[in-house]
Image: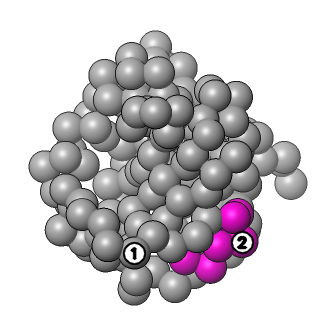
Amino acid sequence: MQKIEIIDLDPQNEAQKLAFKQINYEWINKYFKVEKGDLDSLENPEKYFLATGGAVLLARRGEEYLGTSALKPIGNDAYELCKMGVTESARGLGIGGLIGEAAVEKAKELGAKRLYLETNSSLTPALTLYEKLGFRRIENFSSSYQRADVAMEMWF
């Protein structure tokens, strides 16, 4: 079995950009409804993540892409962990943990003092993963996403 590696998105690589879009679209669509903000950022990860000083990570085994995550700066040495998804075929392989740990390390490399995310309380496995990574819930937050009813953060 081939090793799973975490790589940075190469904006010139159309296969990687397509994998980022498809994995996240399928993930969001499976559990929620894809919103306008999702489509814009999934279509153009360079504009929404890379050009702003963020990052897009892909979990890959050989030529197969299994998961993604994206980081975007949100001000004051803070980044948001967003657009994290795993393919249906890779569920249960620990890809979420690998891509989550890699995103936390990438945020630190980018100089983050705080890492923030929004999710939904119905995603119990994701909440468990985020808590395991070191995130803690935030009370009283507002979101641009209809689906977000949980916000979490970690400080470095």
- Spot occupied by residue 83 in the image (x, y as percentages of width and height): 41, 50
Nearest to the observer: residue 37 or residue 142: 142
Closer to viewer: mark 2 or mark 1: 1
The residue to which callout 1 is attached is 139
Q: Which amino acid does label 2 sit on?
A: Lys
Residue under the point 70% across and 28% down:
109
In the picture, the quarter occupied by the N terminus is bottom right
Residue under the point 24% across and 49% down:
38
Is residue 132 visible in the rendered image? The answer is yes
Which segment did they paint magenta?
Answer: 127-134
| Secondary structure of the residue carrying numbered label 2 | helix
The residue to which callout 2 is attached is 132
Relative to 12, does residue 153 appear above or below in the rendering? below
Relative to 44, does residue 63 appear above or below in the rendering? below
Please say if the residues under marks 2 and 1 sit with CB atoms less than 8 Å apart. no
Is residue 99 visible in the rendered image? The answer is no
- Spot occupied by residue 22 in the image (x, y as percentages of width and height): 37, 48
- Spot occupied by residue 142 in the image (x, y as percentages of width and height): 24, 63
Crowding near pointer 2: few (<14 within 10 Å), some, many (20+)? few
Residue under the point 55% across and 77% down:
127
Mark 2–mark 1 Cα distance, whole angstroms, equals: 19 Å
Whether the magenta-drawn stretch holds residue 129 is answered as yes
Q: What residue type is labelled 1?
A: Glu
Whether the magenta-drawn stretch holds residue 140 is answered as no
